[in-house]
Amino acid sequence: MIERYTPSRRYATLVAFLIDAEERLTDSALDMADKLVGSIFTRARNTKARSFSATSKNVARLMRLFQATIDALAEAASDGRDPMETLDATVGWATLLKARSEVGAIARTADLDPLTAAAERYITLRKFAPDLLETLEFQAGRGGAKTLAAITLLRNLNRAGKRDLPGDAPMPFRKEWQKIVIDQDDKPNRRLWEIATLAHLRNKLRSGDVWIERSANYRRFDSYMLSTEQAKPFIAELDLPLSADEWLDQRARELDKRLKKFAQSLKRDALQGVRFRDGHLQISPIRATTPPKAEDLAQQLNALMPPIRITELLHEVAQATGFLNAFTNLRTGEACPHENALLAAILADATNLGLSRMAAASHGVTRDQLFWTHDAYVRDENYRKALAILIDSHHRLPFSRIWGEGSSSSSDGQFFRGAKRGASGGDVNARYGVDHGFSFYTHVSDQRAPYHVKVISAATHEAPYVLDGLTNHGTGLKITEHYTDTGGATDHVFALCAPVGFSLLPTPARLSG
């Protein structure tokens, strides 16, 4: 298609593609490096845990020996006898001296820092780290001089093919590691120093203290912010005080007022399902509130519903809501004229059947039609627009008010296994086993409508995506309060939700019940 463009348009398109590709490739490289460094330290910690677990029987035996030693010394002190003679008679010096080497070995295992174990996988780091450091230009703010100096030194060593570190090599990492890195001859160990530097760089990239200019996810933090002039109209809409201290004082007074009211109600046992006993807050679990008769009625209503083909249902919903108008042509902006082909393409995505098999299972739609329709009309942004149309149509139905007003919502992630390994097969989250997969992070309104869905890595934290759904759903819902589980509640989400008008209501795990 691009060869049909005029030269100026073709070159502009290629330049735009390269700029976008550079950001994507930079982020992908840093993401992979982050996972590799993290996995090395995870394996090091697991190795230490297995080694320590293997000594559990010996630890139990040595603790019993230690208990017998203490008892012997206490008995000697109470009877006025010589403690050494008593200890030799009851426990035995030979027994204690024999256990000396075992105690030392177990102590060394317990004190082993993951950095030392990570050094065993140094070759893995060397496969990618030199190219990564040579390709990317890292920058840092005040306080990051040591980090940049360490990166520069590592680059120079790689270029010159040198192995030995200078005695004054910068050590930006924590003090515990600085002690481990220094050998017995008071010189820094190259392997330990390099691994510690790369782990430190990973943490600094995550926190934003170190950044890459030509990146989307790892660039300077303030580059994500609006300028002062751009922010003024939004600040006026938020109706917030100009001073952060003033706003914090207001919230502190309000919090103090509510906590005092809560404490008074708690003393009077006026809070249903909440008690304060023996210094612990006890919250009764919520019981099912649906009566059995309602469950029976639901089954009867379901039995009355006539069976219908999924394609017929899609046509009916499309005519009632007009959600197919969201699927416009990428070039012309016009709606798709072939409704059957478009619905078949959408259904292929929804069922994960694939376009070829969907074409084989369909009547009146060819494989070429499906592929052309999917390429021209089906995109992520069009799915978001179509979902917004469906949610708004559902919100306007009087029946939807039975569940709620559409002013509160909740979000959670759901894991789906991938079909294969590799970049397109997803990540591994130990919580769900050893299979690769993805997480679908979904926001659901109190009217049971999933108004925002985001596909994220199975291994990533859910909290950063809470505000995405609340602010970028594109529907007419006016969400004011939002519920999340422990995975979606962090200090950062609290800090950002409050000023923009959302009440974050977490449902943390491990509450007494």
Image: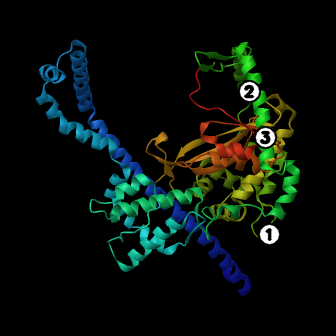
**CB under 8 Å between discs 1 and 3:** no
Question: Dot 3 corresponds to which residue?
Answer: 249
The residue closer to the viewer here, 417 or 258, is 258
Q: Is mark 3 on a helix, strand or loop?
A: helix
Q: Is residue 281 placed above or below 315 in the rendered structure?
A: above
For the residue marked with disc 1, what is the amino acid?
Answer: Thr
Could you tell me residue 439's position as x and y percent?
58, 46
Q: Distance between the residues labelled 1 and 3?
A: 53 Å
| Quadrant into which the C terminus falls | top right
What residue do we see at 41% from left, 49% from top?
42
Q: Which marked residue is nearer to the observer: mark 2 or mark 3?
A: 3
Residue 8 seen in render: yes
For the residue marked with disc 3, what is the amino acid?
Answer: Asp
Sequence-first tag of 2 and 3: 3
**CB under 8 Å between discs 2 and 1:** no
Question: Dot 1 corresponds to which residue?
Answer: 332
Q: What element carries label 2?
A: helix
What residue do we see at 70% from left, 61% from top?
224
